[in-house]
Image: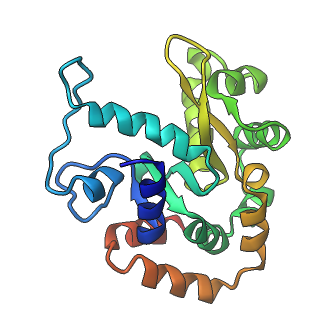
Amino acid sequence: MNKRSAISAINRHGILLVYPMKNKSDVLSLWSVFYPDEEMLWEWTDDGDDRVANLWHLRMKLSESTQVVYAKYFQGRATFFSREVFVALLCLMKTSEFKKKKLTHESKKIMQLLDQNSPISTKRIKKETDLKGKFFEATYMRALKVLWAKLLIVGFGEVDDGAFPSLAVGSSELLFEDLWKEALLADENASRAFLLKKLSKQPAFLNWIQKSL
């Protein structure tokens, strides 16, 4: 698996998780597409399966390619979308309207920051929105969860801001402005029909999308 073949797989299937879910054969991932019927073990040792670590690093490269879109979406897990599927989802979820009218105070603060400067690290988001520290951790996580769920934010590369690189987060509208504008002009019925056809063999994803509308 390499960047080119991974992008091709994401475009072919429409939506793919990065890593597989145990006992969920109907939820496709990059791992299950390229290594079908092979169990993935989280072994980060010198003698472990280097494909796990390689996929972790590939995830970062894919996220900042703009050829596909990366977000913590399906059950809060690392999820890749084809550009066409992302546009259809933005249209059906009326993400732009939700952004203007339904964000909580904390989610709005984060969104305003990211609309001005993206992508940035989690550490910086917390600091610049005054949501830093254990006392605000639950509030911050709730605010971010809403933004992920509505695809208002995306993951875009990594930032070295501590002992371990953290995911850089950015505004969907800012980083994928072309897709955002396309979604504003898209027809809801056409978007729904497209997703039903594209994801016809992935009912778990379709069910999750239905819940998010």
The residue that appears at 27% across and 22% down in the rendered structure is 44
The residue that appears at 71% across and 22% down in the rendered structure is 124
Q: Quadrant of residue 158?
A: top right
Q: Is residue 29 above or below residue 135?
A: below
Q: Quadrant of residue 173?
A: bottom right
The residue that appears at 69% across and 63% down in the rendered structure is 95
Compared across the picture, whether 48 is left or right of 63 comes to: left
* Along the viewing direction, whichever of 9 and 179 lies nearer the viewer: 9
Compared across the picture, whether 140 is left or right of 185 comes to: left
* Along the viewing direction, whichever of 18 and 34 lies nearer the viewer: 34
The residue that appears at 55% across and 25% down in the rendered structure is 166
Quadrant for the C terminus in the image: bottom right
**What is the image's colouring?**
rainbow
Residue 17's x, y, as percent? Answer: 39, 53
Compared across the picture, whether 61 is left or right of 31 comes to: right
- Residue that sits furthest to the top in the current view: 163
Residue 75's x, y, as percent? Answer: 40, 51
Q: Is residue 48 above or below residue 64?
A: above
The total number of labels drawn is: 0
Q: Is residue 65 above or below residue 83?
A: above
Q: Is residue 157 above or below residue 90?
A: above
* Along the viewing direction, whichever of 164 and 54 lies nearer the viewer: 54
